[in-house]
Amino acid sequence: MNGVIHWFRYASPQSFYPLAGRVAPWFGALAAVSGAAGLWIAFFVAPTDAQQGEAYRIIFIHVPASWMSMFLYVVMAGWAGIGLALNTRLSAMMAHAIAPTGAMFAFLSLWTGALWGRPTWGTYWVWDARLTSELVLFFLYLGYMALNAAIDDPRRADRAAAVLALVGVVNVPIIYFSVQWWNTLHQGASVSLTRSPTMAATMLAGMLVMAFAFWMYAIAVVLVRVRAIMLEREAHTDWARELREAAA
Amino acid sequence: MSALGAAVAGLVRRDLLLAARRKSEPLFTLGFFVLVASLFPLGMGPEAELLRRIAPGVLWVAALLAAMLSLGRMFAADYEDGTLEQLALAPVPLVAPVAAKVAAHWLVSGLPLVLVSPLLALQYGLPADAIAVLMISLLAGTPILSLVGAIGAALTLGVRGGGVLVALLVLPLYVPALVFGAGAVDARLAGLSPAANLSLLGACLALAAVFAPLAAAAGIRIALE
Amino acid sequence: MSWGSASEFFAMGGYGFYVWGSFIVTAICLAVEPALLALRRKNALEKIRLEKATNETAA
């Protein structure tokens, strides 16, 4: 039984801190390599689009960023739920660590969506279902971070933000559905920023590779951020003070 | 079961009495609703066709904002004077007093909006059948605003940043109600049936009625610890 | 996909502003986020050192 990993050992900040520190650089390296591969596909493999010309290459950022923003919200809500259920500090810290990165990807999705919309549909903002849902998701992230920041007591902030995240994750499908509904009512034929079903295989491959790169990046950044959060919140503990990097 | 019902009814009555004494606050909500609805024509010009087209959205957004402004009142007073803590300690599941307070809040801040909406709708030149749909949509929708708003109010009890923070938390969650509510009136204006939108709105209300008090009660417990 | 020349690559068929506007802002975000985190970590460690120093002098 010596090969069994006792996962609960890592449930304390003290043991997770060095683990996160060891593991994060590997994810960073993976992000860099797969990002380079994705960019190479985006610019040197994928052909020019018949209708949109070179402008469609923005898809290689826009779609993966959207996926990441949605995926990270669910993961964040998952950690929040675990933290509420098991009353573990570290789970809440993981949720706090994810939020800013998720918000960043939501912002990138909106930014690239606007820049894609301008040459393609003529306006910087296109009220299509995906972009509008993305905007609401961005506000859900901001709300989470604002609530966390507004409450002084860290444990109360953990729990309140966790409730908010869970309420949010339940609402995201409802909001998405309602925005889709609204969009079809008001626009008839879908003015959608997603590609037609006849997407070239290279485009899909490029998007998947970029999504993987973003995912590796997100894991690395979240691990680094949770370490910073641990340092901030556990500053008074012995294990933090005895860290090599905290030596004067 | 009847003891619980009596407790809930008693709490609703108490909240209504308190609101009746501080008449200014429910009137502010109503006044805000009317004011916002009156500002749009001033900003956009009085052209009848335009006003009729924007009426569903404008009136719904105005109701939404008015409901949101009144959220601060839902739990704050009882939180500050310790009543909320007593309610949490009572041998009744916290969900019950929470539901009671939400109901009272709706009666004071939501129902008046429904009753005044026809007057505003006339200002915008909506035809009678659209006004009927508007009232029905607000009748189903304003409780959703109170229920979902209760979650935001509970999570932000005693937190600085107050009204703006609640707005940021709650407005994204209001989107489905807004889409289906305004959509119902829009459908009627276009000569279509509002049934689909109203059904979806009803579904949102059912979901909110079941889950929002639970989330709000959780938020209150967190605030009281 | 082969580009005729470097200038064609940067022009992106006339859509250079949009394409590079997207990729460059992305690159900036992906660089700024870790940089801010490094700063946050540095400040947190500073705070710990400070607390240790004041506690040791007080002890």
Image (cartoon, grey):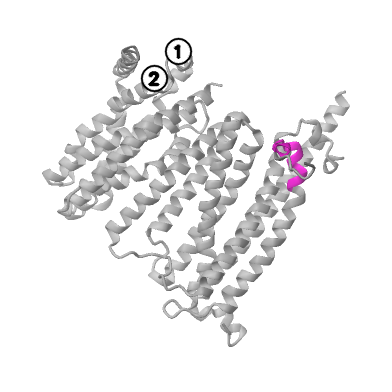
Q: Hey, which quadrant is residue B70 in on the image?
A: top left
Would residue B57 appear left or right of A215 to someone viewing this image? left
The answer to whether marks 1 and 2 mark residues whose Cβ atoms lie closer than 8 Å is: yes
Q: Hey, which quadrant is residue C43 in on the image?
A: top right
Check disc 1 and report its element: helix, strand or loop: loop
Q: Front-most of B163 and C33?
A: C33
| Residue B69 seen in render | no
A217 over B217 or under it: above or below: below
Q: Front-most of A186 and B27?
A: A186
Q: What residue type is labelled 1?
A: Ala
In the rendered structure, does residue A213 fall within the stretch colored magenta?
Answer: no
Quarter placement of the N terminus of chain C: bottom right
In the picture of the structure, the residue carrying the numbered disc 2 is: B97
B27 over B60 or under it: above or below: above
In the picture of the structure, the residue carrying the numbered disc 1 is: B90
Q: Specify the segment rendered in magenta.
A: A8-20
Q: Which chain carries label 2?
A: B
Residue B79: image x %, image y %?
A: 47, 19
Check disc 2 and report its element: helix, strand or loop: helix
